[in-house]
């Protein structure tokens, strides 16, 4: 397996001829996601939450790839579909939560959600953050797991944004 993790995305992504931005293809997305999942293989999350909109597809991919959504007919990891549901469920017991977004650029949305969870639940939860692309120069949140670094800060076209 090629090591994509924490490398600059411009080394791998090609220019999108329609926009001039860097294009993360489905193939490259799949490869880097595999490596992120391998990096998280020791984790046992109770909840996986993808921040709308960009984090939804990666969250579904992670939950399926980790084969942890359903285990022998018993719900092991829940896919939470709204922020309100996440806040309610997280407070029920000590929870291990994975928050996912496609890119952490400013990190504002992720930081706000982490703040809400910490305010409501305190130390009763363990939060891990994952992103496909991370801009360490501008993000206010440092992910626990990420694929590519966006060193140049250029706009990234994700494959799910390029559907006509």
Image: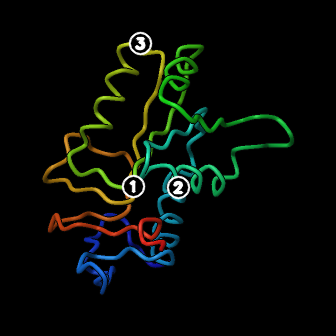
| Residue beneath disc 3 | 120
Q: How far is disc 3 from disc 2 in space, using C-alphas?
A: 27 Å
81 left or right of 75 in image = left
User: Which type of secondary structure does the marked residue at label 2 adopt?
Assistant: helix
Q: Position of residue 164 (x, y in %)?
A: 47, 74
- Distance from Cα at disc 2 to Cα at disc 1: 8 Å
Which residue is depicted at the point 61% across and 32% down?
A: 46
- The quadrant in which residue 142 appears is top left
Horizontal and vertical percent position of residue 56 = 50, 49
User: Disc 3 on helix, strand or loop?
Assistant: helix
Badge 3 density bin: few <14, some 14–19, many ≥20, Cα 10 Å: some
Marks 2 and 1: CB-CB under 8 Å? yes
Q: Residue 58: percent from the left, percent from the top?
A: 50, 55
Q: Mark 1 = which residue? A: 102
- Rendered location of residue 147, percent (x, y): 38, 62
Q: Residues within 10 Å of mark 1 (few under 14, many from 20)?
A: many
Asked whether the beta carbons under mark 3 and mark 1 sit within 8 Å of each other, the answer is no
Classed neighbour count for the residue bearing mark 2: other residues with Cα under 10 Å, few (<14), some (14–19), many (≥20) = some
| Vertical side of 33 occupied by 124: above or below | above
Label 1: which secondary element: strand
Point out the frontmost of discs 3 and 2.
Answer: 2
Provide the residue designation for mark 2. 57
Of 7 and 12, the residue lying toward us: 12
């Amino acid at each position: 397996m090629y090591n994509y993790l924490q490398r600059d995305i411009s080394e791998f992504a090609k220019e999108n001829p329609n926009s001039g931005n860097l294009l993360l293809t489905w193939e490259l997305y799949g490869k880097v996601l595999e490596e992120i999942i391998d990096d998280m293989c020791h984790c046992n999350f109770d909840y996986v939450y993808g921040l709308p909109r960009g984090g939804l597809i990666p969250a579904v991919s992670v939950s399926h790839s980790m084969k942890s959504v359903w285990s022998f007919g018993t719900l092991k990891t829940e896919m939470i579909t709204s922020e309100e549901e996440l806040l309610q469920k997280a407070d029920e017991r000590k929870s291990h939560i994975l928050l996912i977004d496609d890119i952490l650029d400013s990190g504002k949305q992720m930081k706000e959600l982490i703040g809400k969870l910490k305010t409501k639940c305190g130390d009763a939860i363990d939060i891990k953050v994952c992103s496909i692309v991370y801009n360490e120069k501008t993000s206010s949140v440092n992910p626990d797991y990420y694929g590519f670094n966006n060193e140049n800060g250029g706009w990234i076209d994700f494959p799910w944004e390029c559907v006509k």
